[in-house]
Amino acid sequence: MGAPYTGHPGSDGVNQRWAIPVRLLPDELFSSWLVRASLVQGCDPLILTNAVWPRWRVWARDPDRGLSPTRLQALTEVSGIDEAVFEAASLLPTAQTVTGGSVAEFAIWPWVLAIGSRNRRRHGGLQCCSACLANDVVPYYRRQWRFAWHTSCRKHGVMLIDRCPECGAPLEPHRLVAEDSHLAICATCKFDLRRFASSRTDASAEAFQVAASETLAMLEGRYGEECLDPSEWFGLARWFVGLLRVAALRRSAMLATLVRALGVPPETLPVPITGLALELLPVRERADLFAAAWRLMIAGPDELLAAALAAPVTAKSVRQLRKPLPACLDEIVCNLPEGASRRRAKCQTPFTRPRSRRAVMRMWARLRRKAGMPLPC
Ligand SMILES: [Zn+2]
Ligand SMILES: [Zn+2]
């Protein structure tokens, strides 16, 4: 059984060795607190973390995934904050609930935005609401902004941002320096993120976000009349997202007919720029996918079966679409025609054949990401 998805309350009493006590704020992300604690003490985050953990390069990793007991103990000794508070501010409890077990086997934790670090530089992984930062007495990053299903701020009705609107760099508060004094500053160009007015939320993407958060809070989600545990619900959502990404590439008239019958015109689907994993996609691309996935999810199993029969979609093609097939779709697939067992020879593109413009653009986007360059919008 996983842990319910609730923001942690922050920390109360602090009995620390540091000159100035720094409490964890409600739902504050662990790394946000660590950077804030450094700036409050008047030093760069790198200086403070080198003092706490000599010979461990914390910023070359993702400290929000959780720390070892020894490293947590070292931090507790200097900060005066209980280890359990730091553990609650990490991403681990929610990640385990989403996957339904251990996340040790995953290089990229499912549904947790990946930072893609190279030394202290990152490709992404962090989002924020500029209006929340502007309203904060002390600006700080929320733990929920690290999860992939969060694409908007419900409080302010705006899209989250995952890059500096001024220079396009990823949000990297750990690269701030003491003179920056607060977290609402782009570490690359020093733009004050609080000055940016983000675009309005997409209603369907927000509905998906609410359903995902409620599934985690209640430890139960729904698909039609069926109750699903969180890992099943997120597995189903990912399956629908995968279906949409295939449909967006417009290679299957069958899938295009299916998604159109469920209320998603395939020509409106965002064509994947990079084909990267969900956890590496920019916020705009995720919001578009979740908005469409939500329409498929709320259609429910009866409409899905009717649309699949009308398309017609075969059981074989559904099983091959994305593995594993969510258990709650088994019955639907059993009711579909099986389809021909024609074996298609694996098509290998000869090196001499020119690639399509779309394939070149996807390769170019991947290269830009690897090189730490901003992706095209
Ligand atoms: Zn906000
Ligand atoms: Zn910037």
Image: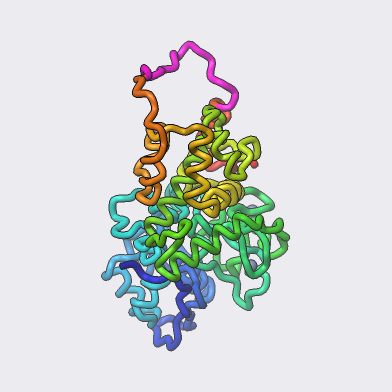
* Closer to us: 194 or 321: 321
Residue pushed farthest left? Answer: 70
Give the image's coloring scheme: rainbow
Residue 179 in sight: no
Q: In the rendered structure, does residue 165 fall within the stretch colored magenta?
A: no
Judge from the rendering whether residue 289 lies leftward or rightward of residue 341; answer left or right: right
Judge from the rendering whether residue 4 lies leftward or rightward of residue 267; answer left or right: left
* Closer to us: 105 or 374: 105
Question: Quarter of the image holding residue 177?
Answer: bottom right
Q: Which residues are magenta?
A: 344-358
* Closer to us: 227 or 132: 227
Q: Residue at x 60, y 55 (%)?
A: 205
Image quarter where the C terminus lies is top right
When the figure is inspected, residue 15 is found, relative to residue 313, above or below; the finding is below
Residue 85 in sight: yes
Q: Tell me residue 255's x, y (percent).
A: 52, 34
Total numbered badges shown on the rendered structure: 0
* Closer to us: 306 or 210: 306
Q: In the rendered structure, does residue 350 fall within the stretch colored magenta?
A: yes
Q: Residue at x 44, y 13 (%)?
A: 350
Image quarter where the N terminus lies is bottom left
Residue pushed farthest top? Answer: 352
